[in-house]
Amino acid sequence: MTISPLQPKIDTSHVDIESLAGNQSLSQDQKIAEASKQFEAILLRQFLSESQKPMVQGELEDDSTTSSIYQDMISNQLSESLSSGNGIGLAKMFEHQLTPRHSTISPPVSKP
């Protein structure tokens, strides 16, 4: 009787996107899930940074480099917080679309 070893649960949140595809310790489903979460975070970061830009530039606006850096830091942290856990649903949708599924449609039966 052969018992397969237990696969340890790997925390994929610390795997950077560049090394995700080549990581041998992750299953295909884990890679897809983490790539989906990271893509959701990227989209959220873009949405948040665009939403913080003023529509009309005023005299009282702080247009300094320091202000821009802090706004980017806020957008990054907020997007990471939103996408961790269940996120806003985009990651699950991406994961569902990227996960290969076996077709449930049976081939036509030829009649004699």
Image: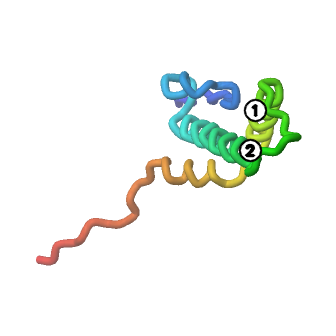
Q: Nearer the viewer, residue 105 or 77?
A: 77
Name the secondary structure under disc 2.
Answer: loop
User: Which is nearer the N-term, disc 1 or disc 2?
Assistant: 2
Extreme residue in the left direction: 112
Is 73 positioned to the left or the right of 2 in the image?
right
> What residue type is disc 2 on?
Lys
* Camera-side mark, 1 or 2: 2
Q: Is residue 26 visible?
A: yes
Q: Is residue 9 visible?
A: no
Q: Residue at x 63, y 52 (%)?
A: 90
Q: Residue at x 50, y 28 (%)?
A: 21
- Which of the numbered marks, if any, corresponds to residue 57? none
Q: Position of residue 39 (x, y in %)?
A: 60, 40
- Which image quarter: residue 37? top right
Contact, mark 1 vs mark 2 (Cβ under 8 Å):
no
The residue carrying mark 1 is: 72
Quarter of the picture containing the C terminus is bottom left
- Which of the numbered marks, if any, corresponds to residue 53? 2
